[in-house]
Every structure is written in structure tokens, then in C-alpha cells.
Image: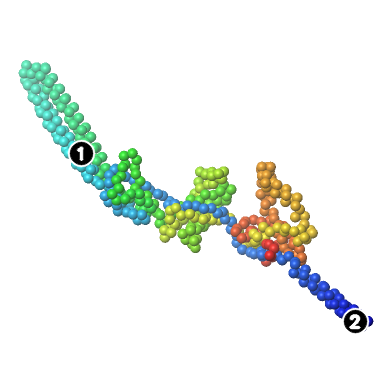
Amino acid sequence: MRTLVKLMLLLLVIGGAVAAAYKPVRRYWKERNRVKWETDEIVRGDITRFVTSTGTIQPVLKVSVGSFVSGPIVELNVDFNDDVTEGDIMARIDPRLFIANVQRDEATLTTREAEVERVEGQLQQALNNYKRGQNLRERNEAFLSDREMDALVFEVKTLQAQRKLAKASVLQAQATLDNSKANLQYCEITAPVDGVVIDRKIDPGQTLAAAFQTPELFVVAPDLRKKVHVFASVDEADIGMIQEAKEASRPVEFTVDAHRDELFHGEIEQIRLSSVSTQNVVTYPVLVAASNTDLKLLPGMTASISFAVDSQKDILKIPNASLRFYPENVEWVRSEDRKLLDSSRWASQKEDDENPEAISAGEKADARRRNNQRHVWVVEGEFLRAVEVTTGLTEYRYTELVSGDLKEGDQLVTGQET
């Protein structure tokens, strides 16, 4: 009997302890298994929308230097990356054959000039004979017959024609000599402009053959140390914003792999109308001008470009992660907002996305306008509450808050803690 009483008292003590610990244990277990949310706050600041692209750095102008004459290279005065001034002799072709041609043509010209002098001497003698004949006939017509007089007249005319022919031969010989002298001058390959040699395509001793086409010997880039162009390809969907940015003279920023920690600046110089279609993707060439005083930007480098197309100052900014968050469980959301999680709505939207041909142009335009109407989520007690917002400009981390029942410092849900 006493043992039974002790057992009952022990059970009562254990039961009381369990009853007393039930609520704290239940509260602890509920708190331990409650969903915890990652949040980020709304901040105030500036925001800029960028359009990104890649491009290639090229000189503003490339001048090809060639050769008009053929022959072996006997002198090479410049190399890659050398600075040249207009008129500098960059290379020299063996001039011996061209010197011989000049000497030959000079001798030919001298011969032709001597021929003119000989014909003029004969012509003068014929004129003297003609005058003597005229004087004799004036004294007495019987001294010279008509036939003898005609011979004197036509001898003068013949020599006058020979003099014209000889003078024409002199002009021809002079033209040939000028051509040979020009070819001799072409043996010196001179720089047509001030610039930097970015390519050299000949070596000493190499023989040039310019019979069919002018060979390219050097490529000179004028003003490479002043300015370069960055050739960017911009998608047709973004080219409208690029046009607005050009009209507003908005800056352009870009980086190159050779100088990863340095940010370069430029400006939009030209938007070309010649579109390029690659695998049904249409792009437009955009020329960005940038300073290159320290010659860090070399031809052929690949640039990662950011075009600043729009900006806002001193505005509220929503974290982009909060716009991407969407509750997966209806039980996490308060009852008033559970209609936003209607699966049929999202299913129909997904179906439209998978069948864009089924949407008319007007519906597409309306959908783009409604795309700025979004929902973000805030923690309210044990549940999440949806807040409708209207968004504006977007950058890499934040999006402009145009309207919505939110203020600076409010915490928005960005994800679930794991």
C-alpha cells in the first residue's frame, strides 16, 4: 500500500513537471522551426541606367604606305611602334636601275635637242636660199625658173615640218626623263603623315614586285597618342537609348583586360546606320572616342563598355534581390495577399511567355508598360505582406522606387535563410 502511494506521488510529480514545461517547450520548438527571412533595406541615393557592350579599339585613321616601283629593299629606317614625321624616309629601294634610266633619258633628250638645232640650221639655210632666189627673180625673172623657185619654197616648208617634229621629239624625251626621275624619287618610301608605325610588312633585302598592284609596306596611325576609336556593337533594342544618350552628351566608361584596375572615359562620336545581322540578331556600330595620351589603349584591344543612358538624383532605391523574391508557400503569406499566389494566373502567364506569337502587338506594348508594376514583400508578424510598387531605372544592384507605400530604411525580403 505504501509503495503504491509513493508510485502515485512520483507520477503526479512527473506529470506536473511535464505540464509546467509544455508551453515553454512548445514555444521554443515553434520559434526554432519558424521561417527566417533575409532582408535588405531601402536606401536613398543616385541611380544610373547603363547599356553594356563589347568593342574593339582602333586608330581614328590608318594610312597604308606602299611602293609604286619594284626592286630590292636596301635600307629600312623604321620599325614597329616608331614615331614618324611627314617626309621622313622610312625605307629605300635599290635606285641603280632607276639612276641608269634617268641617265639614258637625259642622253636621249640631249640628242633630240641637238636634232632640233640641226633642223633649224638647215631651215635657216633654206630660208636664205629662198630669199636669194626672190632677189634674183626681182632683177630678172629669167634667172630662175618656176620649177627652181618651187623647189626652194617646198624645201623651206619641209624643214619647217621637220623642226616641229624635232621639237615634239624633245617634248617626248622630256616627258620620259620626268617619268624616270619620278620613279627614282619613288625609291625613297616617305611618311605621308605624322604618326606611329603600327605595322611593318617588309624586311631588309626583300624584293618588291609592284607590277600588278601596289604592295603595302607600312601602316601608319596618325594621332594615335591623341585619340582612338572604340568600335562597339549595340543591340537594336538598346540603340534608341544610345541615341538619346548621344544627344544628351552622356559619358561612356570602359575597361580593357590589359589594365583591369583602370577606368577609361570617352564619348559617343557616331552611331552608324549600317546594321549588321548575325544569326537573326541585329546590331548597330557605335563609335566611342577616347583620349590616349599615355598610349595605354593599343589597336585591337577588347573593351568592355558601359553607356550611361539615363540617371536620377536623390531617389529611393529598392534592392533588386527583393524584386526577384517570390514566396513559394502560401502559408507564409497573410490571407489578404494569398490571391497573388494564384497558380492559374502564373500558369497562364508562363503559357503566354512560351507562345509569344499568340500575343498581339498591342498586348505586348501593354505588357511592357505593366512590367513596372511589381510586388515586394515585408515581414509582418509571422507572415509576409505584399506591397505594390512602381519601378523606374535599374542598375546592377538597385532599382528606382517611383511609387509605393514604402520609406527609406524599410526592410524588404530578399530570400529565405538556410
In space, the residues marked 2 and 1 are separated at their CA atoms by 146 Å
Disc sitting over residue 105 in the figure: 1
On the image, the x and y values in percent for residue 21 come to: 82, 75
144 to the left or right of 339: left
Residue 8 or 309: which is nearer the viewer? 8
Residue drawn 31% across and 50% down? Answer: 203
Disc sitting over residue 343 in the figure: none
* Earlier sequence position, callout 2 versus callout 1: 2
On the image, the x and y values in percent for residue 326 come to: 70, 58
Residue type at numbered disc 2: Thr
Q: Nearer the viewer, mark 2 or mark 1?
A: 2
Disc sitting over residue 3 in the figure: 2
Residue drawn 69% across and 65% down? Answer: 417
| Up/down of 233 relative to 152, above or below | below
Q: Quadrant of the C terminus?
A: bottom right
Residue 226 or 330: which is nearer the viewer? 330
Residue drawn 80% across and 71% down? Answer: 26
Residue type at numbered disc 1: Asp
Label 1's element?
Answer: helix
